[in-house]
Image (cartoon, rainbow, N blue to C red):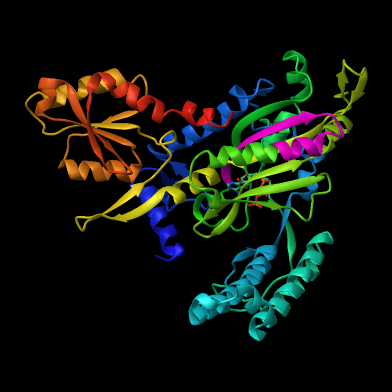
């Protein structure tokens, strides 16, 4: 199946089974805003728990906070967001649609890549085993022509972005490449303008006393402005980290690809404060720790790659993304940045407060350097859903849709089903749930045939199902079915908790990180 079709199916699956709904749907929705349903919220909470525990439980020098969404507006001046948190936008006069100029150009670069890949795929098919891809790429005239155009475009684009960005330069590239609006099909473009991504509102009841404030576009600044509070009250010694999970808001110009790019989303960020001069060593460590955290979910190492940034933000001295293979290619899920002492120094300057660290071992004061790990909960959710979604052909000719979610993250861990709705079987099933519900999330289901009930649980990713039959009333044993292998085994009720609890707990995944 084409990856685009897989993605469409995934989006409708998310809706059909209560994972993700478009926000305000009965009013036709609100662009790039989504709600999580009864299954989605469980998965999302489990993701957050996995992250939080890996940070705060496994590292004795990392603590958490929960700072407010509203913050003093000067914070965003100090952080650079008021002046520089912009995207270059361009409108098409005919369709009245708005685009990010940089994204239009990046899509054009991707088109050249696609053309090259098509040539390679065609040749690979033609030559079979004898195909030498490297040689083909370096000698085939059509490939070379596309490659030269692509490289020239990439170079021009990088120059324009690095020069401010150079807005006229970006527009000229769009005109020269004859990029058309996908809706109107025309090249009738406006000038390119800078667009600030922060949402603003007013705080205060009187018109003249009201203050313009922003909805935070990242959670990190809440950590920076609390750095001293936490360091002092927690008697933290460098190196130490502060973790936070919370909502962030960005007025994205082009919001596409479902929950990949939203206007209201959630971040899990950790700022790790270190001694100046040690930051690159810590950056390397955190790169490795974070990749291990992702890989521990078991989707396979080929689903991940690092993307080191060539162009660094002015305050950073190293940055990388962890990318995940989504149905629409490798995409950033997490950023790891070495942010120097930029943020703390800026807050020191703008607030006039001393926020230096006094090192009792060396008797010196300094502004700590910071390594940041920043991951979007929603993107993580999307990556997990897309890697878990499978359509399987069964031996009996039927097919099933199954979400092969890591058991530790699955919304429901165990479904308990009486074979029939009579003869005391429902009561026995309820008894099992009443015992196990304290340990993990269970669901009771008595409607329809057992086969249909299994399919429903497969579709929401429940790793285990238990069937209670007449024999159960005699021997206190049940049939335990495994979601992935579909194998069934007969087990005593008294052992269910022992068998399942460990396999579905977040703790079991956390242990692999040590
Ligand atoms: P992008 O280049 O995709 O816009 P970014 O580099 O601006 O992302 P960061 O500012 O580094 O992203 O934010 C850290 C993480 O927050 C990202 O890796 C991503 O997982 C998440 N994130 C950022 N913007 C959004 C958004 N609009 N919707 C959902 N998640 C987001």
- Is residue 468 placed above or below 257 in the rendered structure? above
Viewer-side residue, 505 vs 201: 505
Q: Residue at x 22, y 41 (%)?
A: 453
Q: Where is the N terminus found, in terms of image quarters?
A: bottom left
Viewer-side residue, 304 vs 247: 304
Tell me how many marks there are.
0
Residue 493, horizontal then vertical, whole percent: 23, 22
- Is residue 194 placed above or below 81 in the rendered structure? below
Q: Residue at x 39, y 45 (%)?
A: 404
Q: Is residue 17 left or right of residue 231?
A: left
Residue 206, horizontal then vertical, whole percent: 69, 31
Residue 4, horizontal then vertical, whole percent: 45, 63
Res. 228 in view: yes
Q: Where is the C terminus found, in terms of image quarters?
A: top right
Residue 294 magenta: no
Residue 283 magenta: yes
Q: Is residue 512 left or right of residue 142?
A: left
Res. 94 in view: no
Residue 75, horizontal then vertical, whole percent: 77, 35
Q: Residue at x 57, y 79 (%)?
A: 119
Q: Quadrant of residue 415?
A: top left
- Magenta part of the protein: which range? 264-285
Residue lying farthest bottom? 141
Q: Residue at x 47, y 32 (%)?
A: 46
- Is residue 315 placed above or below 469 in the rendered structure? below
């Amino acid at each position: 199946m084409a990856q685009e079709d897989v993605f469409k199916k995934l989006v409708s699956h998310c809706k059909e089974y209560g994972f993700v709904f478009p926000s305000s749907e009965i009013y036709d929705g609100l662009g790039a805003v989504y709600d999580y349903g009864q299954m989605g919220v469980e998965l999302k909470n489990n993701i957050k728990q996995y992250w939080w525990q890996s940070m705060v439980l496994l590292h004795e020098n990392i603590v958490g906070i929960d700072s407010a969404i509203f913050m003093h507006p000067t914070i965003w001046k100090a952080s650079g967001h008021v002046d520089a948190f912009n995207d270059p936008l361009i409108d098409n006069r005919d369709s009245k649609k708005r685009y990010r100029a940089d994204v239009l150009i990046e899509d054009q670069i991707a088109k050249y890549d696609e053309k090259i890949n098509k040539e390679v795929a065609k040749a690979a098919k033609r030559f079979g085993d004898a195909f030498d891809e490297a040689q083909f790429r370096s000698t085939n005239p059509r490939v070379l022509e596309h490659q030269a155009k692509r490289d020239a475009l990439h170079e021009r684009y990088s120059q324009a972005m690095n020069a401010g960005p150079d807005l006229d330069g970006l527009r000229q590239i769009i005109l020269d490449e004859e990029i058309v609006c996908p809706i109107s099909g025309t090249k009738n473009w406006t000038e390119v303008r800078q667009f600030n991504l922060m949402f603003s509102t007013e705080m205060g009841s009187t018109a003249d006393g009201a203050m313009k404030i922003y909805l935070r576009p990242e959670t990190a600044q809440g950590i920076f402005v609390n750095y001293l509070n936490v360091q002092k009250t927690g008697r933290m010694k460098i190196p130490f980290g502060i973790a936070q999970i919370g909502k962030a808001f960005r007025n994205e110009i082009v919001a596409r690809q479902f929950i990949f790019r939203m206007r209201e989303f959630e971040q899990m960020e950790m700022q790790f404060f270190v001694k100046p001069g040690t930051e690159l060593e810590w950056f390397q460590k955190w790169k490795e720790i974070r990749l291990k955290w992702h890989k521990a979910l078991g989707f396979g190492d080929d689903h991940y790659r690092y993307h080191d940034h060539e162009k660094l933000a002015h305050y950073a001295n190293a940055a990388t993304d962890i990318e995940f293979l989504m149905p629409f290619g490798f995409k950033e899920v997490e950023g790891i940045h070495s942010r120097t002492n930029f943020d703390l120094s800026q807050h020191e300057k703008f607030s006039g407060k001393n926020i230096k660290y006094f090192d009792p071992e060396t008797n010196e004061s300094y502004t700590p350097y910071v390594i940041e790990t920043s991951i979007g909960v929603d993107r993580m959710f999307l990556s997990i859903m897309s890697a878990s979604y499978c359509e399987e052909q069964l031996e009996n000719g039927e097919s099933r849709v199954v979400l092969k979610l890591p058991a530790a993250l699955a919304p429901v861990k165990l479904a308990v089903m009486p074979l029939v709705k009579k003869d005391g079987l429902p009561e026995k099933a309820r008894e099992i749930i009443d015992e196990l519900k304290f340990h993990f999330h269970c669901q009771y289901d008595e409607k329809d045939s057992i086969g249909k009930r299994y399919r429903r649980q497969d579709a929401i990713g429940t790793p285990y199902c238990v069937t209670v039959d007449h024999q159960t009333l005699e021997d206190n044993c049940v049939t335990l079915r495994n979601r992935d292998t579909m194998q069934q085994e007969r087990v005593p009720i008294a052992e269910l908790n022992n068998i399942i609890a460990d396999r579905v707990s977040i703790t079991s995944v956390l242990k692999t990180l040590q």
